Image (cartoon, helix red, strand yellow):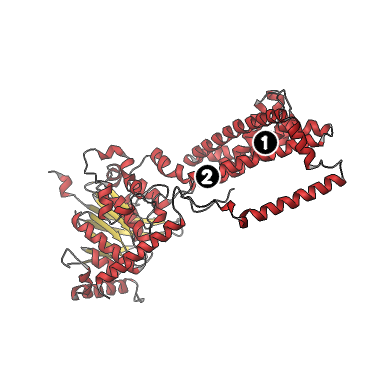
Amino acid sequence: MSAAVIDAGVRVSNVSKSFGADGSRVTVLDDVSLTIGMGEFVSVIGPSGCGKSTLLKVVAGLIDADGGTVQIDGSTVRAAAADKRIGLVPQSPALLPWRTVLDNVRLPLTVNRRADAGRAIRDPKELLASFGLGHAMQKYPGQLSGGMQQRAAIARAFVFDPAIMLMDEPFSALDEMNRDQQRLGLLDFWQSNRKAVLFVTHSVPEAIMLSDRIVVMAAHPGRIDRIIDVDLPRPRTEEAYASDEFRELERVVRTALHEVMGGAHV
Amino acid sequence: MSETSTIDATASMAAAELADRRSRRDAPSARRAPAWLRPRVWLPTAITFAVAAFLWQFVAITNPYVIPTLDAIGASLAGDPAMYWANFLVTLQEVVIGAASGIVAGFLLAVVMAEFRLIERAVMPLVVVVMVTPIVAIAPALVVAFGFGMMPKYIVTALVVFFPMLVNSLAGLRDVDVKALDVFRTLHASKWEIFRDLRFPGCMPYVFAGLRIALPLAVVGAAVAEFVAAGQQAGLGSLVTTSAAQANLPVTWASIALLCVMGVLLVSLLAVVRKRVLWWSDGEVVAR
């Protein structure tokens, strides 16, 4: 096959972005470069104001960068979006309250249908069943718990088989016990549906548990400080939390965050 | 605690939460015993109306030239139901046609303004100028322009409905769930698809808030237009002015009562439709 395979995944090159008026411009992203390979799970972690959400929005094409380029499978973000190659899971589930869970998950299949030609659309019902929502398909979002809503939002992003998946702190609104359950559910699903994932989080255990690599960002200006490889064996289960390697990684990531935040307590 | 029991506990918590939510809002076909059947609900209202009726009768009997008694009003209605019905229908026709035009026009302009800021900036000042002009002042001028037929009544009614519909629809179209919009944008959904699947259903709480204001105003508009220009087809508003001029108080108040009934019917109908369409909405949007 062609160049598309060689360039598969996400390539962020020298991206910069600042906000505000001339006098008080804030550099949110300063020369950020990052690649995410096919089927690779990359988390971005850092203090607030480090631009991790802005980075995700630039990759999603929701914000234009001031400088630098983003390529998805070798094409521009705009072309990738037009081709429905980007799956987004926002911070809140953002389900449409007037549609059933099933119709919410079908939503991506009803817009921009031109891009559906010749692609492997998933059966929304099967997908919901594999997310443990088989019994809730005909319910409305308002009848679901927060965790179930977030799972429906993830199913909505997987249904059209995008090449890359962007997740912006998808579990941050859930309580800790529920959050851990959702995490393991996502891990389990991703294990058999490998996508390139860019996952923004502020939870250290979450980043370690899910990722192949953890990008630690620093603030003012927002930049990549270091990238930590996570070489825990896959598939990972809950037992991984208890392993010595996990604890060691947790120490490494926390130390990195500690240094990034100028010695402030993490 | 072992791992499996943790997960079980979480699962059963989720199930309990689900059951709880289900009982709170069983959409879309929730059926419980209607609340108005319970005395706690209807009795206070009934007492208020009884007291008001008693006070009315007291004033009417002691001051016969100020207001007529309730039985005189009732007798007038019963004496010539065909006349009242004909006039009721004339006014209702003005309200329905006028309001429908105003609602559609107000919503469509809101859609255009929501998509193109430039149009809002260009047109909104003119709309505000027209709207601060008292409608009772515009009505006679419209009669000069359009004669004594139904047209000036439609226009006046449409005018008073137009503004609340425009302002509320515009607010609703703008108040879109930004995170959901992000999802649509990453899917490269067209403007039309975003309107069809997100903005249009999403703005309905605001549209209904606008309708709640607009429909009673429509009755006001039709009545005012009839005050100014009776025309061949009278209507309840004309009936009020002509009978008041002849000091025929039972007819005046019977007509007022029918205008009131019309307003109540329209608002009740709206409430029924709202419940069917907007069952998913958490609460009433405060109208502008």
Disc 2 from disc 1: Cα separation:
23 Å
* B218 in relation to A70, above or below: above
- Residue at image location 84% in from the left, 34% down from the top: B247
Q: To which residue does mark 1 refer?
A: B221
Task: Give the number of the mark in front: 2 or 1.
Answer: 2
- What percent of the width, then of the height, locates residue A237? 20, 67
Q: Secondary structure at mark 1?
A: helix
Which residue does the numbered mark 2 point to in the structure image? B274
Image quadrant holding the C terminus of chain A, namely: bottom left
Position of residue B152 relative to residue B281, above or below, is above
Question: Could you tell me residue A195's position as x and y percent?
Answer: 22, 54
Q: Please rate how many residues cluster around mark 1, counting C-alpha atoms within 10 Å: few if below 14, some from 14 to 19, many from 20.
A: many
Residue at image coords 53%, 46%? B206
Q: What chain does badge 2 belong to?
A: B
Q: Residue at x 72, y 22 (%)?
A: B232
- Residue B109 as seen in the image, left or right of residue B79: left
From the viewer's perspective, is residue A22 above or below residue B7?
Answer: above
Whether labels 2 and 1 share one chain: yes
Which of the 4 image quadrants contains residue B64?
top right
Type of amino acid at the residue the image marks with label 1? Gly
For label 2, the SS is helix
Residue at 52% of width from left, 39% of height from top?
Answer: B110
* Closer to the camera in the image, A167 or A100: A100
The subunit carrying tag 1 is: B
- Mark positioned earlier in the residue sequence (2 or 1): 1
